[in-house]
Amino acid sequence: MKISMHFRGGITSKSTANGSVHLVQRTSNAKACSAQRPLGLRQVKARSMAEFSSLESEDGYMNEDGVFAEGKPASPDDNPSFDESEQERRSNDAFERVRVLSDALPFIQDFRGRTVVVKYGGAAMKDETLKELVVKDLVLLWCLGLKPILVHGGGPEINSWLTKLDIAPNFSPSGLRITDKATMDVVEMVLVGRVNKSLVALIDQAGGKAVGVCGKDGQLIRAKAINKEELGFVGEVTAVNCELLNSLCDAGVIPVVASVASDSDGNALNINADTVAGEIAAGLGAEKLILMTDVPGIMLDKDDVNTIISKASIKEIRQLTERGIIVGGMIPKVQCCTASLAQGVKAAHIIDGRQPHSLLVEIMSPEGSGTMITG
C-alpha cells in the first residue's frame, strides 16, 4: 500500500457587495484600461448573442463558474485532464486513500504510544528500493504516535565484505555464524559502522529522527559467549538497559540497534539479531515484536504461500514443530517469538520483508500480512 499526498488548487473570483460577479471588459487602449469598470452579470447577459460571441472570440470566454477568463476555452483535444475516465480514476484513487486511512483509525488509536520492536535484516536489506519503503513505513508509524525500535542484522553485507577480504564465511549446523577474531572485526565494522548509520540516515531523510546504537553503547546490552571453543565470539543476551531505550523513545527519536555487544571483559560479541530484538521487546514489555524475514510467514507447506497460517498460539506453534512443519531456520525465529511472549510481549509476528508495506499491513489491518503468534 503506497500512500501519497496531493494538493489541489482552485480559481477564486471577487464579488460585489450585492453578490454579483465582476467581469472586466479588456481593451488594448492603455487609457481605456485605466478607466475600465466592472460589468454586472445582468449586463453581460443583456448583450446580444452576436456581441457575446464577439467578446468570447476576441477577448476571452465565460468559464463554467460564470467568470470571464482570458484566452480560449480548453478542449479535450488539447487538455488530457478532460478525459472523463482519467478523472474518474483519480477520483476513485483519492477515495480509496481516504478509505484506507479511515479504516486504519481503530488500529492507530489502539497502538498510539505503544512500543513496537522491529527486527530488520536478510534479503530485504539488499534491495535499496525495499529498504527505503521499510524505513518510510517505520517513520509513518512514528508519526502516528507509535514508539518503534529498529533492530537490524546485516548478514548479506557481512558476507560480501568477508569475501572482499578473503575470509571464508562459516556457519554452525544451527545456523549461527562461526566468528573468529578477524570475522568479528568485520562484523562490527559492517553492522555498527555501515549498516547502522545508513539506516539512521535513511530515517532522517524520510522525515524521522533516529539515533544509532549498538549493545556496547551505554551498556545497552550485556552479553556472554555461548560456546567460544566452537563458535568463537558469538554471544547471548544476559541483560538489556531498558532505561536507555525508554529515554530515547520518550525524547521522540527512533532507536536503531546493531546486534553487537561485549562481554564482561570488553570482548566484542556477535549476537543473532532475532534474539536481540526478542530480548529488547521482552525487557520493555512491548506491544509487538515483528520479525521481518525472507518468507511470507509460517506455512503448512513451505512451498505453497496459500497455506500460510495467519494466527497461532504458543501451544499450536509447539505442535507444528513436533509435527515437523516448522523446521530449519524458522525454528530459532519461533523460539525467539515464544520466549518474548512468555516474558510479557503482547504479540509476535513473522512477516515477509520482501513485500512492500508488509509492516504497515501487519499492524494496521485486520488481515495482516504474515503469521501472528499470541500467548
Image (cartoon, helix red, strand yellow):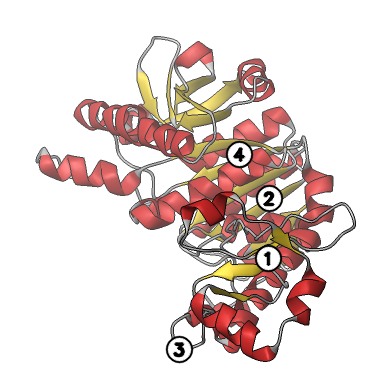
SS assignment at label 2: strand
Q: Residue at x 70, y 71 (%)?
A: 96
Instruction: Tell me which numbered mark, 3 or 2, is placed earlier along the sequence.
Output: 3
Residue 348 disc label? 2
Q: Report the residue that reaches farthest toward the left.
A: 166
Q: Residue at x 69, y 68 (%)?
A: 67
Q: Are marks 4 and 1 in contact (CB under 8 Å)?
A: no
User: Foreground residue, 173 or 201?
Assistant: 201
SS assignment at label 1: helix
Q: Position of residue 371 (x, y in %)?
A: 65, 63
Residue 97 disc label? 1
> Does residue 170 show up?
no
SS assignment at label 3: loop
Measured in 3D between alpha carbons, the distance from the residue under mark 3 to the one under mark 1, in whole angstroms, is 30 Å
SS assignment at label 4: helix
The amino acid type, in three-letter code, at marker 2 is Ala
Instruction: Tell me which numbered mark, 4 or 2, is placed earlier along the sequence.
Output: 4
The amino acid type, in three-letter code, at marker 3 is Asp
Return the residue at label 3: 77
Q: Is residue 353 left or right of residue 308?
A: left
Return the residue at label 4: 278
Q: Position of residue 290 (x, y in %)?
A: 61, 49
Q: Are marks 4 and 2 in contact (CB under 8 Å)?
A: yes
Measured in 3D between alpha carbons, the distance from the residue under mark 3 to the one under mark 4, in whole angstroms, is 60 Å
Measured in 3D between alpha carbons, the distance from the residue under mark 3 to the one under mark 2, in whole angstroms, is 56 Å
User: Foreground residue, 251 or 244?
Assistant: 251
Measured in 3D between alpha carbons, the distance from the residue under mark 2 to the one under mark 1, in whole angstroms, is 28 Å
Instruction: Tell me which numbered mark, 4 or 1, is placed earlier along the sequence.
Output: 1
User: Foreground residue, 281 or 102?
Assistant: 102
Q: Nearer the viewer, mark 2 or mark 1?
A: 1
